[in-house]
Image: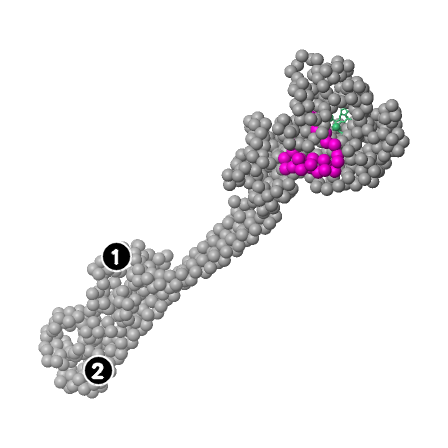
Amino acid sequence: MSKENKKQIVIIILIFVFLIAVGIAYMTYMLNRIEANTNNSIETIVKNDADNLKNEITEQKAILQSITNEILADNIVDSKKIFDMYERSDITSHFIRMAIMYEDGRTITNDGYEKDYSDEVEKFFSDNDIHISENMKSRIDGEEITIYSQMIDLENEKIAILLIVKTDSYKDTFSNKIFEGKGFSYIVDKDGAIIVSANTDKGTGNLVNNIEQMLVGSSKERFKTNKSTVQENIRNEEAGARRLQTTDGQYYMVYEPIGVNDWSLATFIPSKAIAGEINRALLTTFILAIIVILIILSICIYVVISNNKKQKQLFEYAYIDPVTKKGNIYYFRKKGQEVLEKRKAQEGNVTQYIAVLDINKFKMINKAYGYQMGDTILYGIGEELEKILGKESLISRYSNDYFAVLFEYEDNIRKIVNKLVRNIENLKIDSNVYNLSVNMGIYKLTDSDNNIAEAMDKAIIAHSVSKGDVFDKYHIYDGKMEKELEKESRIEHEMNKALENKEFKVYYQPKIYVKDETLYGAEALVRWEHNGKMVSPSEFIPLFEKNKFILKLDVYVFEQVCSDMKMWKEKYGKEPVISVNVSREHFLDEHFLEKYMMIAAKYGVDTSKIDLEITESATIEAGIDIIEIMNKMKALGFLISIDDFGTGYSSLSTLQDMPADILKIDKSFVDRIGKNEKNMIDYILTMAKELKLITIAEGVENKKQRDYLLEKGCDIIQGYYYAKPMPEEKFEGYIEK
Ligand code: C2E
Ligand code: CA
Ligand code: CA
């Protein structure tokens, strides 16, 4: 996971946590609000109920008062008249009956009962005030009743007027529907005794027990507020509300004095019922909150995903090579730099290398197989590199057919490099094998490397040493290389000027017939006269082959030779065979022979007097049809020499197919003459004769070698024994003779 991704995830988590926190805070707030609202509305309902009750009782008291007033005013003693008064009015609807009690306890009712209440007389005859009784059982019909009573002082006697109410009728004034019948309302007296229960079932026994216990006192401590207990509140006719825990569960209790008889109305709502109400409201809020959170979250996730996608795309545009699907140069530099930094931090406990490799003459492969196949081959190389070096290694194509890799390897580096070269040179794609030629430069990272570009340069230096070399496939960087390269770059810097300034001179080394020691011709060898010093071809020819300057130089030498030949012909009327070296670099250019032809024509030189020397190794170069080139040479009239024969690996049969004229036996074979070593020279000479080739022995330095060659039938000798390469003026002397 990238740093950027981690950051994004942290931000999303933070947003999420924030939303949850806000949600919880909001819900808690809502919960409290809802609860307060619910409690408020419960309190309001209870207050209303209490008011209704109070009104009802006040009204009933007023009725009693008006009856007693009338009786008193007219001093009515006749019970029948009193009952008539009651029955005539519409007040009967409030009461179940009226009774008149006499001081001896005799009591008569409007509906014809007569009972003795002498045991209760005191209660009704104490004063002139209106009294409302506690809830009691009727002695007439066993109903629960409440009695309104007032004593009247008549002229001759005292009577008490009693209006009897069915206690249960108070129920109608309560909001029975409170919390859909889940709540319980009671009228209680100041001692907490239940007078009326609004619910027919009175609540469960437990609740009633609890309430009574609470109100009557044994558990009063539990309900103590900082000021007073519920019990004290009710005794003092104070309103209040509180949450209370009973063995039956939690209840919200509201009590309100009625203002009559020290009664209070007490309502209990199970917390569960309130919670149900709250939960319903809360659920809506909760669902809404969840939806909002989910929307915000999915927006965040969408933004992150599309952002990541875009970044990935940008990364691909910037860092991925479309052909190999591996990294490009920028990727290599970026990741490579990270590797160097990590290495520094670990103080280089790992052995790591940078290798740079390229495919020789990849252009030819594109030409031969087509560009699409060329791309497939490049892709295959990338895959092969990854297969051998592992997925953790850094693999990139940094341009055309150049790859750069950075990898860890603890074993002998040559092992893996050999494997890399072998596998890539025999690249297998879909069971087809493609023969490629690879060169590689390897640099071992050190702890002082802190710049990837510089480290890569060292691998490139090592690569440039082996570049184009068929036999030396790779080089491992060492310090000397840099000096060599510096020298090379100095030469490169000066070569074009040298050509303009005619610093390149053509020397001639005579070729002598062994038999009669007459002149056959000469080989043209280039010399560089630089700042008064003669620079040897071995110092610049390999470089010029690498940087292709040899193409210009060879043409220059060829033109110089043609010009000299023209001059000799005019001056001496003689035309010796002159050989010129043709670098293999020319063979990639189809038209190079036409250029040579034009130059020869320009000087009127007979091409049959010009011998083109091709090195044996050039004839086996991959991707070049040397036979075709040689046939062209022949068709134009040139002679052909196979140079340095014996150093390459060409077989007799390949030589047989070549339209060559001359075989130049390499100096190394001549050196071995008379040294009791195994020497192929006899065999080469016999074979050449069979193929009807002229044989020239190179580098003959002494008489012993000359005599041996004469004996074995070699045709021509070129070597210090007869003459070293010499300037044109000196060679003219040979022609003259
Ligand atoms: P080469 O084509 O094999 O040339 C023969 C080399 O052997 C020459 O070296 C010559 O001076 C040297 N040599 C001849 N006889 C003797 C001998 O008896 N003893 C010793 N020790 N050396 C002998 P040189 O001139 O230094 O050239 C070196 C190479 O440079 C040539 O090898 C040739 O490959 C290349 N070269 C020289 N001039 C040209 C040129 O104009 N064009 C191209 N393409 N290559 C050139
Ligand atoms: Ca030569
Ligand atoms: Ca040679």
Residue at disc 2, secondary structure:
helix
Q: Looking at the image, which is closer to me, 380 or 486?
A: 380
Residue 403, magenta (yes or no): no
Image-quadrant location for residue 564: top right
Residue 728 rendering spot, x and y as whole percentages = 86, 28
Could you classify mark 2 by the number of other residues whose Cα lies within 10 Å: few (under 14), some (14-19), or many (20 or more)? some
Residue 324 rendering spot, x and y as whole percentages = 57, 43
Residues in magenta, as a range: 620-645
Which residue is identified by label 1? Answer: 248
As drawn, is 45 to the left or to the right of 213? right
Q: Looking at the image, which is closer to me, 614 or 502?
A: 614
Q: Looking at the image, which is closer to me, 709 or 391?
A: 709
As drawn, is 286 to the left or to the right of 207? right
Q: Quadrant of the C terminus?
A: top right
Q: Which badge, 1 or 2, comes first in the chain's sequence?
A: 2
Residue 462 rendering spot, x and y as whole percentages = 67, 31
Q: Amino acid at mark 1?
A: Asp
Which residue is identified by label 2? Answer: 91
Which residue occupies 88% across, 29% down? 572
Q: As displayed, is residue 286 above or below residue 53?
A: above
Image-quadrant location for residue 325: top right
Image-quadrant location for residue 249: bottom left
Q: As displayed, is residue 57 above or below residue 704?
A: below
Which residue occupies 77% across, 19% down? 514
